[in-house]
Amino acid sequence: MIGVLEGELGNPESLHDSARAPFAALEEARAAVAALVGADPDGVVFTAGDVEARNLAVKGIWSANRHRGVHLVTTAVEHDSVINACRALQRVGAELTVVPVDRDGRPDPTALAAAVRDDTVLVSIAHAQDEIGTVQDVAALCAAVRARRDDVAIHVDCSATAGLLPITADVWGCDAISIGGGTLRGPRWAGALWVRPGTRLHPLVDGGAQEGGKRAGHHDLVGIVGLGVGARLALDDMAMRASAMTAGAATLIEGLLTIDGIHVNGPRVGRIPGHVQVSVDGVEGEALTLMLSAGGVACSPGSACSAVGKSSAILEAIGHTPPRTLSAILFTLSHETTADEIRVAVDVVADTVGRLRAMGVRE
């Protein structure tokens, strides 16, 4: 990224000499992202982060296929940016079916397929739920939808798993995949949407013909290069990182469960590597997060982008009720997180929970 900043920042869309290096950097990043998702580079559309990529998938595919129908299908544990994009489309005529999930946050493939109607144009699902960590059987979900109707577009959001778990567009048989830079150790403001050739999609931003006419505006070349490097490095060390992060998360869970009144949310196995969410009896998640930060332990209340003071819709969807839905905290580990750091974190959590309970700080 520094090399791009210090080099010639010609417009990669131009034909003059100073455009050659930026164009090459752009296409190198496109190829790296395509390799990460197991797809062709021509389908990669760069966006300003994963939220835009999700919105482009949902709104763009629905808008381009309104002549075929107005119905959308998603699940009760999708990211807010998917759910809210669907809700926004309802205001302009879309119809939405939200499929329920089980206690681990997994939809039944049969129920997902049954929700597909003759006028359904898009099914949007996530590879993994970024709050409770549940990894979905995407191949089974896509196969069930295809068995019901082969012409329905399927979007898979991989923003929580890109670079941590294998993504296989062709094996899944989906039509769009969204990713972001965060899980790739890249810039969080950079993202991408892969769209299968032949899938109709309207741009969110009107303007020029950049990104094959699917995303107008000048390229954030620095961010895109960072995203591409992150994708390339992730492919190189994915197995190592996932193994270390899964082992670290298991150690953290084991330690946290020695503290009275702590409950793991989501499945014990089949989680996003390095992902741990728990609810803590007798305390409120935001108060605990703030006090843990003061003690040198970083976590977030429920999810990294949850609204302050709001009960977790994801925990409600898997059957939990207050106070458990208000007392959740989320830890995410790196492959570089050490056993000593995990031990210290558990000790700090135990001490902080004890102090908060003694103070009577409750939900």
Image (spheres, rainbow, N blue to C red):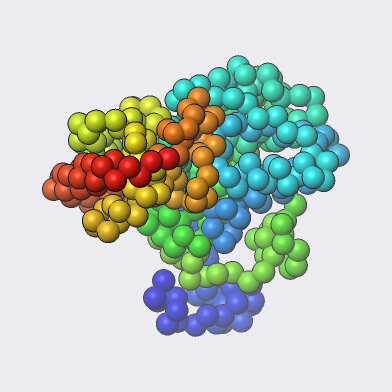
Considering every residue shown, the one lying at the far right of the view is 67
The residue depicted at 39 percent of the width and 31 percent of the height is: 265
- Above or below, 254 relative to 24: above
- If the image is split into quadrants, where does the N terminus sit? bottom left
The x, y position of residue 275, in whole percent, is 35, 40
Q: In which quarter of the image is residue 200?
A: top right
Q: Quick check: 213 left or right of 355?
A: right
The residue depicted at 58 percent of the width and 59 percent of the height is: 47
Q: In which quarter of the image is residue 110?
A: top right
The x, y position of residue 257, in whole percent, is 24, 31
Q: In this view of the protein, can residue 61 be seen by the observer?
A: no
Query: In terms of depth relative to the viewer, which is nearer, 310 or 170?
Result: 310
Q: Quick check: 98 left or right of 71?
A: left
The x, y position of residue 22, in whole percent, is 52, 73
The residue depicted at 39 percent of the width and 44 percent of the height is: 285
Q: In this view of the protein, can residue 154 be seen by the observer?
A: yes
- If the image is split into quadrants, where does the C terminus sit? top left
